Image (cartoon, helix red, strand yellow):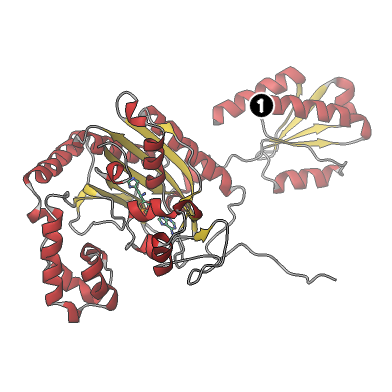
Amino acid sequence: MPERKQFRAIKGTRDILPPDSALWNWFEHSARETFESYNFGEIILPIFEETELFARSIGAETDVVSKEMYTFLDPPRDLNPLPRTLMEGDQIRTALMSDLLPRDILSLRPEGTASGVRAYIEHGMHTRPGNVKLYYIGPMFRRERPQKGRYRQFYQIGAEVLGQSDAPAIDAEVIEMLLTFFRRVSLTSTTLYINSIGDKNCRPQYVELLRDELRKVKDQLGLDSQRRIETNPLRVLDSKLPEEQPIIEKLPRIGDHLCAECREHFAKLKDELNLRGIQYEENWRLVRGLDYYTRTTFEVIAAGLGSQNAVCGGGRYDGLVELLGGPPTKGIGFAIGSDRSILSIQENAPDAVKRHLPPLAVFVAWMGAASYPTAVSVAKKLRGCGVSVELPAEEMKFKKSLGLADKLGARYALIIGEDEVASQTYSLKNLADGKQEKLGESALLEYLEAERRGRG
Ligand code: HAM
């Protein structure tokens, strides 16, 4: 006898069940509609790529690349000191420096920007007219400690603009599109934070200055921050440790060390946001956890989510296309975390949730073998008109039928018995108020279709 084992979803992954899945579909559909109204087109990207693509673009020292990626050798093989299976940190670095072909070291994608840029270069999209405006929807993978709003398989909706211009109007339009989408899905208790982290001309000096200042207070910092002084001092600004906050508040601020071009770019971005009536808060500590950013960075946080409250992160990444071997190109984009956004909508906008979880419209309560063919035929016609119909496969007693219709949340019971078949009429019972009327087939179809359109 095989062992009776109960399988469970892997820690950090989850099933999204109906009716919640309907909410997810509505959320993604609304994104598609909003983004397409801004002339973005969908790109469908692979789930795994060469590890080196992520290491080079996101940065080998970032948490995402050094600790959180699902990395594996393909084909699997024994290579001392590399394990046959998952790798992290130093092992990834060793593998990338080894004689292995880069194409043999793969990772599940932890985000979409690197893949989007890879596709842009691979398909010569820079020859397309105007800016290339792409969006993508799908799962991402990071081996983080799971908690509310943080998963190992999570879902993003991302958008990227790639082209020759770095006009701040593009940054502002991308942010406008994001907030238009959030409004459309009733995600309105949000705050937009913006910052500029400078470019290759001014950031290196600021990073050195920050490093010098941090070294002076090193012994007052936690171990993570101490390590980051050498690896990536900007990330110290992200720290949430209460005891580090007064120290961080006294550190030099990037805004005071931007070069003239970056300062002007940031000032124009704010003008452009004002022009569009977009409210924002400046946050000099918003540095983001991925290395490719230059100048504009932004994040949106939503109410009621606890510590994992960032529902979107984004920014400019001029230079990333070149770093990955493409022509000089500017880029900006964002990614929305669908899991957290939907959680926030469920907690803060119950009316929107209700509107987008359409209840079952019609339960066909048929009785007697003679009425079954009519029930099958009318169910098919109603479904053809877009009405959702539940047709029991087996005959049920009338009372049981109505009880089940009620439990399923049906709005109507369509009663078909021998009388109805004989008179070629149907009894439609409104389960909310108990009212019942007799309708011929075409009147029935018309009525229910109009009702569906009214709700849609
Ligand atoms: P990110 O800030 O790493 O940026 O992720 C964007 C959003 O994905 C976060 O704000 C959050 O809502 C969601 N997210 C991230 N990790 C998790 C997780 N473990 N569980 C649940 N949700 C999560 C990026 O990924 C960049 N590629 C964004 C971008 C596009 N920048 C320019 N273009």
Most distant residue in the bottom direction = 219
Q: Residue at x 24, y 57 (%)?
A: 287
Q: Residue at x 36, y 64 (%)?
A: 63
Most distant residue in the right direction = 369
Q: Residue 166: percent from the left, percent from the top?
A: 21, 36
Q: Residue at x 68, y 65 (%)?
A: 7
Q: Is residue 192 visible?
A: no
Q: Residue 45: percent from the left, percent from the top?
A: 48, 41
Where does label 1 land, which residue?
A: 448
Q: In the figure, residue 209 lies in which quadrant?
A: bottom left
162 to 104, vertically: above or below: above
The residue closer to the viewer here, 172 or 66, is 66
**Local crowd at mark 1 within 10 Å, few (<14), some, or many (≥20)?**
many
Left or right: residue 60 compared with residue 26: left
In the rendered image, which quarter contains the N terminus?
Answer: bottom right
Left or right: residue 166 compared with residue 127: left
Q: Is residue 296 visible?
A: yes
Q: In the figure, residue 268 lies in which quadrant?
A: top left
The residue closer to the viewer here, 14 or 265, is 265
Instruction: Tell me the kind of residue under disc 1.
Output: Leu
In the rendered image, which quarter contains the C terminus?
Answer: top right
Mark 1 secondary-structure assignment: helix
The residue closer to the viewer here, 305 or 197, is 197
409 to 101, vertically: above or below: above
| Label total for image | 1
Q: Residue 409: percent from the left, percent from the top?
A: 66, 44
Q: In the figure, residue 118 lies in which quadrant?
A: top left
State whether label 1 is within 8 Å of ligand 1. no
